[in-house]
Image: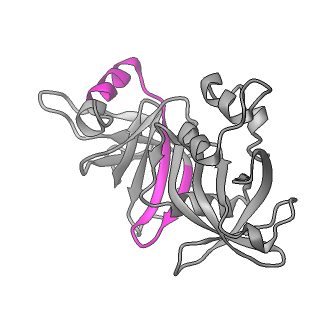
C-alpha cells in the first residue's frame, strides 16, 4: 500500500498528522514545513542507497506530494537511480505533469517492515512515462518494536550454531538494541538463511563475565564489497537483557545521551 497520509493516524502521533492532512480550521502546510514535521528526530542517512535498494527490490509503492498541491498525495514507484547524478527515475503518478512543473519541490515517502523513509527533493526532468527527481537529504525512522542505535566504535561479536560448542564465525556490529542487532559478516560467509538460530557472544565489559544471547536471522542484504549484512532478533533471558543495557550505554549511546 502507498503511504496515504490520511490513513496513518494509528501509526503517527496526532501532533504530526494534524498539520499534514489539513482541515477547515487547519490549512495544509507547505511541503518544506511538512518535511520538517515528518523528519524531525529521524535518522539522516549517510548512505541513501540502503533506502533506494529496498524500494527497488520490493517495487515499493511510494507516496509523493507536489509543491503546488501539498494536500493531495499521489502514488508512484522508483524505477532506477542514475549512478552519475544520483537522481531518481520514477514512474509518473496519475496527475498530469507539464513542462512548467519542472523545478517543483516534491516530498517522497515510503515504508517497509522495518523503516519509514523519505526526502524533500525537486522535479528535474519529464519523459513520456517517467520523471526525474533530485533528492535532498534522505531520512529514515524505525518501525521496530524497540529502537536500534548505530554502534559508535568497532565491536566484533562471535557466533555459534546450537550444535557447536565454540563460536565458528564473527561479525562486526552496525547497530544494536533490545530487540536485536544488525552486523556485517565477511564476504566469505554467505551461507546464512532466514530462520537460522545462533548464539551471539558480544565482548565482555570490564569486570563482567562473557555473555551469550540466543538470536534468529531475520533478514539478509548483500553489501558489496564488504560482505553480507545480517539482521538478527534477540531472544534474551532476563539476565541477558539487563547486560544488554550496559552494552548499549558503552557502544551505542544515542546522540546527546
Tell me if residue 229 is in the magenta stretch.
yes
Magenta residues, start to end: 219-246
Tell me if residue 250 is in the magenta stretch.
no
Residue 66: percent from left, percent from top: 72, 55
Residue 68: percent from left, percent from top: 74, 53
Q: How is the image coloured?
A: one colour
Residue 127: percent from left, percent from top: 78, 78
- Quadrant for residue 28, please give it: top right
Which of 143/89 is in front? Answer: 89
Residue found at the far bottom of this picture: 84
Relative side of 247 to 130, left or right: left
Q: Identify the residue at horizontal 78%, vertical 34% (top origin).
A: 6
Relative side of 208 to 76, left or right: left
Residue 125: percent from left, percent from top: 69, 75
Task: Decide: is 233 above or below 168.
Answer: above
Q: Identify the residue at horizontal 86%, vertical 59% (top origin).
A: 95
Task: Decide: is 165 above or below 136.
Answer: above
Which of 182/84 is in front? Answer: 84
Relative side of 42 to 201, left or right: right
Relative side of 211 to 105, left or right: left
Instruction: Let me know if residue 237 appears in the view.
Output: yes
Instruction: Let me know if residue 194 appears in the view.
Output: no
**Total number of numbered discs in the rendering:** 0
Amino acid at each position: 500500500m502507498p503511504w496515504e497520509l490520511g490513513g496513518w493516524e494509528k501509526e503517527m502521533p496526532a501532533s504530526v498528522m494534524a498539520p499534514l492532512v489539513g482541515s477547515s480550521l487547519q490549512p495544509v502546510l507547505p511541503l518544506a514545513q511538512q518535511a520538517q514535521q515528518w523528519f524531525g528526530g529521524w535518522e539522516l542517512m549517510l548512505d541513501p542507497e540502503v533506502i533506494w535498494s529496498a524500494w527497488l527490490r520490493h517495487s515499493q509503492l511510494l507516496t509523493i506530494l507536489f509543491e503546488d498541491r501539498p494536500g493531495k498525495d499521489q502514488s508512484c514507484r522508483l524505477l532506477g537511480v542514475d549512478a552519475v547524478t544520483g537522481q531518481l527515475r520514477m514512474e509518473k503518478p496519475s496527475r498530469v505533469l507539464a513542462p512548467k512543473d519542472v523545478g517543483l519541490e516534491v516530498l517522497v515517502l515510503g515504508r517497509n517492515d522495518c523503516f519509514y523513509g523519505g526526502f524533500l527533493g525537486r522535479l528535474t526532468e519529464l519523459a513520456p512515462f517517467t520523471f526525474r527527481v533530485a533528492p535532498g537529504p534522505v531520512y529514515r525512522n524505525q518501525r521496530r518494536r524497540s529502537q536500534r542505535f548505530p554502534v559508535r566504535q568497532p565491536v566484533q561479536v562471535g557466533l555459534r550454531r546450537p550444535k557447536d560448542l565454540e563460536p565458528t564465525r564473527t561479525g562486526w556490529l552496525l547497530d544494536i538494541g533490545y530487540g536485536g542487532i544488525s552486523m556485517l559478516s565477511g564476504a566469505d560467509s554467505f551461507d546464512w538463511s532466514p530462520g537460522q538460530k545462533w548464539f551471539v557472544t558480544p565482548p565482555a565489559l570490564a569486570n563482567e563475565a562473557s555473555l551469550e544471547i540466543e538470536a534468529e536471522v531475520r533478514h539478509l542484504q548483500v553489501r558489496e564489497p564488504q560482505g553480507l549484512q545480517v539482521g538478527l532478533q534477540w531472544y534474551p533471558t532476563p539476565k541477558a537483557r539487563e547486560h544488554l543495557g550496559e552494552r548499549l550505554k558503552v557502544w551505542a549511546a544515542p546522540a546527546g545521551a
